[in-house]
Image (cartoon, rainbow, N blue to C red):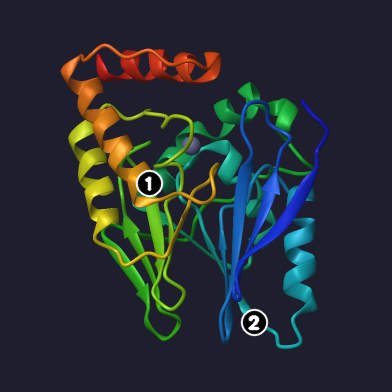
Amino acid sequence: MKGNTMNTQTISPKAKVYVFDSIEDYVTHVFLIEKKSRFYLIDTFCGSDSMVPVLDTIHLSPQQKDVIVINTHFHWDHVWGNCCFAGCTIISHEKCRKSMETHWETQLDKNRNYISGKAEKCLPNLTFTEKLTFCEDGIEIFYSPGHTEDCISVFDHEEGILYVGDNLEKPIIYVESSDIPAYVKTLERYLRYPATQIVSGHTLGLTKKDILSAIEYLNFLSTGHPMTFESAYAQKIHLQNLGQCKV
Ligand SMILES: [Zn+2]
């Protein structure tokens, strides 16, 4: 494990990203959106210690606001800090809650090195199947299967920011679900949102061109079109993705 360092960046007047680099190979993002009477927190990284800077920001707010936590999918690097928000609304897709429940202990055992503080089991307490909208804040949360079958995404209609979880990532997307047609459908849906910014769990500054490249990659993957990647990391993930497609 690398040293646990974190920096924050402002991505819009109302949204901030916490960038963690303690996991090898990629950085991981947690997003905090501040609206009139609520904070929306997208993912909670690796445990209670990693959520300290987020809680500091929330506590600095002069007005007490509710915190709505959104888990983009069940993977450990996005949910272990949930325990800091046990009294809050924690939203996920219904499949995400089920997968978290099933895989909590195994994910913990396999990735124990990355626990930052406490990672007590804390499951989402509000689940949905297709879409959930906080109308007065312009926050739309929708089902977007792809990277895994439980993925959800968030579109902030006021700020024009599309948060895509792990469905987009550079240099290469990570395919864990074998349902490639559903993944392509999700990416095509992203193209229809009037997004001025696209951000994901591990990559910032994504563009519509990145969405189109991901669609092309998935199409090549499903037709068996041969591909090789220059970077050893991308090639490794590509081979894993190929294995996933054969399931
Ligand atoms: Zn993931």
Q: In this view, does 11 lie above or below 233?
A: below
Mark 2 crowdedness (10 Å alpha carbons): few <14, some 14-19, many ≥20 = some
Q: Is mark 2 on a helix, strand or loop?
A: loop
Q: Which three-letter amino acid code belongs to the residue tagged 2?
A: Lys
Q: Work out how far the residue at label 1 is from the one at label 2, CA to CA, in angstroms.
A: 26 Å
Figure quadrant of residue 55: bottom right
Q: Which three-letter amino acid code belongs to the residue tagged 1?
A: Cys
Residue shown at the point (71%, 45%) measured from the top left = 47
Q: In this view, does 207 lie above or below 63?
A: above
Q: Where is residue 123 in the image (x, y as percent from the top left)?
A: 53, 51
How many numbered marks, from 0 up?
Answer: 2
Q: Which residue lies furthest to the right in this view?
A: 3
Asked if one can make out residue 121 in the rendered structure from this viewpoint, the answer is: no
Residue shown at the point (68%, 31%) measured from the top left = 23
Asked if one can make out residue 239 in the rendered structure from this viewpoint, the answer is: yes
Give whichever of discs 1 and 2 has the lower sequence position: 2
Depth check, front residue: 241 or 228: 228
Report the side of 46 relative to 104 (left or right): right
Residue shown at the point (27%, 26%) measured from the top left = 178
Report the side of 56 relative to 178 (left or right): right
Q: Is residue 236 above or below residue 90?
A: above
Q: Position of residue 66 (x, y in %)?
A: 61, 78
Residue occupied by mark 1: 151
Q: Where is residue 51 in the image (x, y as percent from the top left)?
A: 73, 55
Depth check, front residue: 49 or 88: 49
Residue occupied by mark 2: 65
Q: Is mark 1 on a helix, strand or loop?
A: loop
Figure quadrant of residue 27: top right
Disc 1 residue: CB within 8 Å of ligand 1: no
Q: Position of residue 225 (x, y in %)?
A: 21, 15
